């Protein structure tokens, strides 16, 4: 057998996973920008996690649990895991986004693993993307369909019929939930068209075009952050079929050198991992 083929050592893989999970969360400005300095006691923590009507309290509790997990103190917070699992049904996507990140901090938990698999099918794109990135820590290939979609343009459909009017130009950087177009109906009413995720705008029709409900009107090319996170995930678990998704990022000058370099490393890792072993 050929032992000269380069392989990642266990230490290197673990280090890479730590780096990945530190930045796994696709930022949500408000939810990750609030500081919760006051430590909650057990009674408060239980109450905050169960307070479905106060997302801020839930965020406070999740932040405290995340801090303990990052310190390696999983034993001190495992009693709260069933309540965390129940939060996967919270109606506010931002809660589920943060929950998906927290659950990636303990890849030994079956409760977290099962919940993340459900969240990876969540209707909200930021929730299922965060859940998939956290599933990378569980070495769960259920994350792959979502990770692959992160490297592909996201179609945006018209919410109604009328005349399309773009307020942003082709190639504009669009943030999540940002309005980039409106659809004007004959009666003068307007429907807002918002981005489901961040990305670069590619209109499929010009302003003034008449559209019908459900008709695709634009594509959002992957943002640098989302592309980078997806490429790093495929570095760890990408399969040969993923090379077709990775290779365009090797030469796409819209992305910076960091992303092109990550695409190179990812492609190399996939080839090395899947290359048939030689026998003497």
Image (cartoon, rainbow, N blue to C red):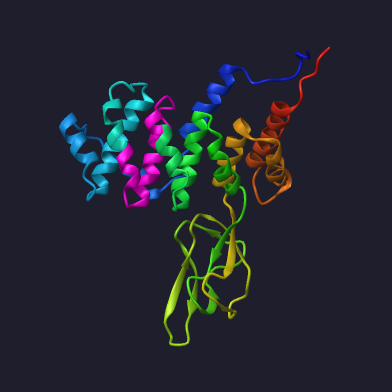
**Is residue 35 highlighted in magenta?**
no
Q: Which residue is located at x 22 percent, y 31 percent?
A: 39
> Which one is nearer the viewer's eye here, 233 or 145?
145
> Which one is nearer the viewer's eye here, 232 or 84?
84
| 27 relative position to 237: left or right | left
The C terminus is located in which quarter?
top right
> Which one is nearer the viewer's eye here, 115 or 8?
115
The N terminus is located in which quarter?
top right
**Is residue 98 highlighted in magenta?**
yes
Q: Which residue is located at x 57 percent, y 47 percent?
A: 150
Look at the image and give the residue range highlighted in magenta.
85-112
User: In the rendering, at what x and y percent does residue 72 appear?
Assistant: 37, 21
User: In the rendering, at what x and y percent does residue 151 appear?
Assistant: 61, 47
| Residue located farthest toward the bottom when viewing the structure as drawn | 187
User: In the rendering, at what x and y percent does residue 29 appear?
Assistant: 39, 49
Query: Would you place residue 243 above or below residue 172 in this image?
Result: above
| 262 relative position to 167: left or right | right
Figure quadrant of residue 118: top left
Query: In terms of secondary structure, what is the magenta stretch mainly?
Result: helix
Q: Which residue is located at x 46 percent, y 49 percent?
A: 126
Query: Would you place residue 276 above or below residue 43 in this image?
Result: above
Q: Which residue is located at x 39 percent, y 33 percent?
A: 112
């Amino acid at each position: 057998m050929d032992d000269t083929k380069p392989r990642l050592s266990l230490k290197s893989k673990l280090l890479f996973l730590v780096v990945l999970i530190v930045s796994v969360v696709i930022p949500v400005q408000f939810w990750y920008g609030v500081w919760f300095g006051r430590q909650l006691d057990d009674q408060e923590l239980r109450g905050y996690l169960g307070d479905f009507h106060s997302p801020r309290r839930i965020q406070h509790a999740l932040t405290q649990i995340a801090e303990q997990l990052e310190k390696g103190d999983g034993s001190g917070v495992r009693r709260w895991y069933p309540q965390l699992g129940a939060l996967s049904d919270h109606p506010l996507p931002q809660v589920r986004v943060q929950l998906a990140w927290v659950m990636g901090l303990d890849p030994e938990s079956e409760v977290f693993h099962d919940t993340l698999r459900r969240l990876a099918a969540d209707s909200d794109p930021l929730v299922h993307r965060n859940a998939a990135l956290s599933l990378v820590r569980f070495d769960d290939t259920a994350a792959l369909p979502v990770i692959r979609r992160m490297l592909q343009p996201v179609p945006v459909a018209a919410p109604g019929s009328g005349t399309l009017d773009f307020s942003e130009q082709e190639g504009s950087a669009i943030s999540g939930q940002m309005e980039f177009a409106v659809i004007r109906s004959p009666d003068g009413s307007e429907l807002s068209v918002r981005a489901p995720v961040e990305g670069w705008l590619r209109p499929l029709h010009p302003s003034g075009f008449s559209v019908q409900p459900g008709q695709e009107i634009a594509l959002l090319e992957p943002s640098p952050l989302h592309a980078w996170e997806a490429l790093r995930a495929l570095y760890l678990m990408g399969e040969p079929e993923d090379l077709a998704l990775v290779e365009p990022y090797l030469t796409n000058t819209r992305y910076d050198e960091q992303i092109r370099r990550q695409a190179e490393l990812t492609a190399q890792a996939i080839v090395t991992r899947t290359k048939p072993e030689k026998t003497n």
